[in-house]
Image: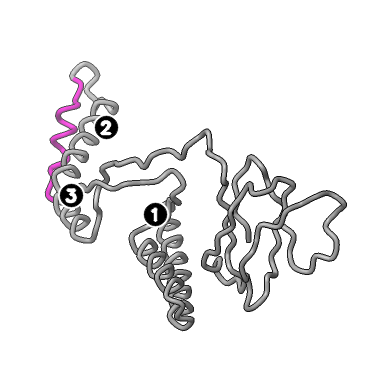
Amino acid sequence: MVKCRPFYLPVYIPSRVDQITSLIVYQYVSFLTKGKNILDHIYSNVKAAYISVPHPHFRESDHLGVFLYPTYRQLLKQASPVSKTVQVWNEETDLLLQECFNTTNWDVFKATAWCEENCSVDLEENALVVTSYISMCTDNIVSMKCCKTFPNQKRWMNCEVRSMLHARSTAFASGDAEAYKKARYNLCRSIREAKRQYKLKLEG
């Protein structure tokens, strides 16, 4: 697999290249991509436009990942990370909120929204008061934390996946094939679980 950036977009040619074309092209991959062979070829008609760097395998692939970094200075820089405050939900907060709502006298809100003119409850006023009360309870019970997000960060990404990514990169750099294989397996498992949890969150 190849991940590269324009402006000079190279062409990926998988193994066994017998004849490229009559055009002058430059091969960027200079390191072994599978075992003792260079089975992945990336060509462009712009010389030295990219620098190729080996990266860990993508998921179950048996080829190394090939990343191309542009040698020219980019005009547009990647957006800076954004820090934001989020609520920390867990089983304890759920139980506390449930207890809070179970002991709430909801009839008080109906009395507050009672309209004497037509002897009925103003639904809009009642909904506003109830949602304000729920927000107040949530703010008092659920703790907050500051986290940093990046522009290219997936929505299902969590601390467990980040930890497994770091472990995989460390194992890859160490050269320990057995540790690297185990780290890759743990990363794939963490990604599947993170996606499953995010799916359940959306459905909820």
Quarter holding residue 127: top left
User: Could you say where residue 89 lies in the image, as x and y percent from the top left?
Assistant: 25, 54
Q: Residue at the spot x=22%, y=56% of the render?
A: 94
Amino acid at dot 1: Lys
Task: Determine the secondary structure under disc 3.
Answer: strand
Which residue does the numbered mark 3 point to in the structure image?
Answer: 143
Amino acid at dot 2: Ala
Amino acid at dot 3: Ser
Q: Which residues are magenta?
A: 103-115
Give the number of the mark in front: 1 or 3.
3
The circle on residue 127 is 2
**Quadrant location, the N terminus:** bottom right
> As rendered, which of 126 and 49 lies closer to the eye?
49
- 19 displayed left or right of 174: right
* Residue 114 included in the magenta stretch of the image: yes
- 71 displayed left or right of 25: left
Q: Mark 1–mark 3 contact, CB under 8 Å? A: no
Task: Determine the secondary structure under disc 2.
Answer: helix
Which residue does the numbered mark 1 point to in the structure image?
Answer: 201
